[in-house]
Image (cartoon, rainbow, N blue to C red):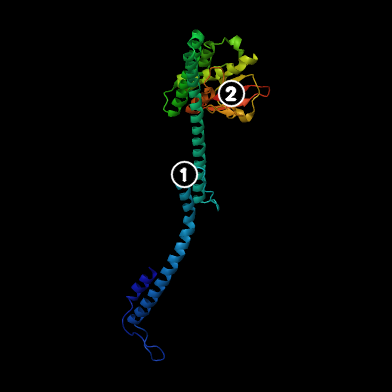
């Protein structure tokens, strides 16, 4: 553009010798100036084009190299390898932020798929166990019908069938809250908790349940069936751990200083480390190679996992805190 402006300006120079210089020579005319300008413009443009393309190629390569690393990581993820990371070095610019965000996304996807694989494997084991037991009992009964106690066999088959049904129902309850778009209405968390406690299979006195003095009304905007399932699972979990030791269960319902509804259930029992407590909301989680201690007789092992799922569906905060003297405190705080 600079050369074009120069040539345009030269178009207005008269094509004649307007003056004579001191030594008797004439000043250059327009055609002379244009001849020199075109010649130098050609070589100048050729030089700038060569230098510009070379420097631009090098600069573009340096700027696009981070994108190439991100592309390779995306291709590896597309092929199923979620362990690959970009780990982009350098200053904290837009490309570095993009790479860090991509790494965080891959890490979250890897955790999610790992949890899904572990859940599938454990769920398959839990669903297969009662079926295998029933098959074995039927095979034994068929091999020696005279030695079979028919009544006891039917009782055992009923227990295994109930366990299988409970596991299926728990899995369905675990999946439904994740769908979102739940119908919600105004509920009283205190009334729901009292209703669950009064309809418990184990009497309050026998279960060792004590209601806190701060048992106050607490309004929540929630799905009533799922809210009841959350409270029922927490109460059942506390009773399951508390009955063997004959301890106490403390139930507290009210609001926190910010006006949010809060339910807290604490129970006595065996001591639980903070590491194990942090994993109790995972389905069928295994600790030290054994089923987690929260698995009660005839339970599905999904009680706290369903609680966590319902809490997420309601955007509630769920905290599991081990008690120093043994047992666990579970607190659910609903949004205002």
Q: Which quarter of the picture shows residue 330?
A: top right
Q: How many labels were placed on the picture? A: 2
Q: Residues at badges 1 and 2 in contact (C-beta under 8 Å)?
A: no
Report x, y in % for residue 30.
Answer: 33, 80
Marks 1 and 2, Cα distance to the nearest angstrom?
37 Å
210 lies above or below 83: above
Position above or below: 92 against 177: below
Rendered location of residue 317, percent (x, y): 54, 28
Q: Earlier in the sequence, mark 1 or mark 2?
A: 1
Point out residue 307 in the picture as x, y percentages from the top left corner.
Answer: 52, 24
Outermost residue toward the bottom in this view: 24
Residue at the extreme right: 325
Q: In the rendered image of this protein, does residue 323 appear above or below residue 36?
A: above
Picture coordinates of residue 286, whole percent (x, y): 57, 28
User: Which mark is in front, 1 or 2?
Assistant: 1
| Residue 233 seen | yes
- Residue matched to label 1: 77
Residue 162 visible? The answer is no
Q: Residue 242 carries which label?
A: none
The local secondary structure at tag 1 comes to helix
What's the residue at 50%, 11% (across, down)? 153
Q: In which quarter of the image is the N terminus?
A: bottom left
> Callout 2: few (<14), some (14-19), or many (20+) C-alpha neighbours within 10 Å?
some
Q: Mark 2 points at which residue?
A: 330
Q: Is mark 2 on a helix, strand or loop?
A: strand
| Quarter of the rendering containing residue 22 | bottom left
The residue lying at 53 percent from left, 26 percent from top is 284
Residue at (44%, 44%) from the top-left corner? 78
Residue 327 or 148: which is nearer the viewer?
148
Image-based side of 329 in relation to 316, left or right: right
Q: Residues within 10 Å of mark 1 (few under 14, many from 20)?
A: some
């Amino acid at each position: 553009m600079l050369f074009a402006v120069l040539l345009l300006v030269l178009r207005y120079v008269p094509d004649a010798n307007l003056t004579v210089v001191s030594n008797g020579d004439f000043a250059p005319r327009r055609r002379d100036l244009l001849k020199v300008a075109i010649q130098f413009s050609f070589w100048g443009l050729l030089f700038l084009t060569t230098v510009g393309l070379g420097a631009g190629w090098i600069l573009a390569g340096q700027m696009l190299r981070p994108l190439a690393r991100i592309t390779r990581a995306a291709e590896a993820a597309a092929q199923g390898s979620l362990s690959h990371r970009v780990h982009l070095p350098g200053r904290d610019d837009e490309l570095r932020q993009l790479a860090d965000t991509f790494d965080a996304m891959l890490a979250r996807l890897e955790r999610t798929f790992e949890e899904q694989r572990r859940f599938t494997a454990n769920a398959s084991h839990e669903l297969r166990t009662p079926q295998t037991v029933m098959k074995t009992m039927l095979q034994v009964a068929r091999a020696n019908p005279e030695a079979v106690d028919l009544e006891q066999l039917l009782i055992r088959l009923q227990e295994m069938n109930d366990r299988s049904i409970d596991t299926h129902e728990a899995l369905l309850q675990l999946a439904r809250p994740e769908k979102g778009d739940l119908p919600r209405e105004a509920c009283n968390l205190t009334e729901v908790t009292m209703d669950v406690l009064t309809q418990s299979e184990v009497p309050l006195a026998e279960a060792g349940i004590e209601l806190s003095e701060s048992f106050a009304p607490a309004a929540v905007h929630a799905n009533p069936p799922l809210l009841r399932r959350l409270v029922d699972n927490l109460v059942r979990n506390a009773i399951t751990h508390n009955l063997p030791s004959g301890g106490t269960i403390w139930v507290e319902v009210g609001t926190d200083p910010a006006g949010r509804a809060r339910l807290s259930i604490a129970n006595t029992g065996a001591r639980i480390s903070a590491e194990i407590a942090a994993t109790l909301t995972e389905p069928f989680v295994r600790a030290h190679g054994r089923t987690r201690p929260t698995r009660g007789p005839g339970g599905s092992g999904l009680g706290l996992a369903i609680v966590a799922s319902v809490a997420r569906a309601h955007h509630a905060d769920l905290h599991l805190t081990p008690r120093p003297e043994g047992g666990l405190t579970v607190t659910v705080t609903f949004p205002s």
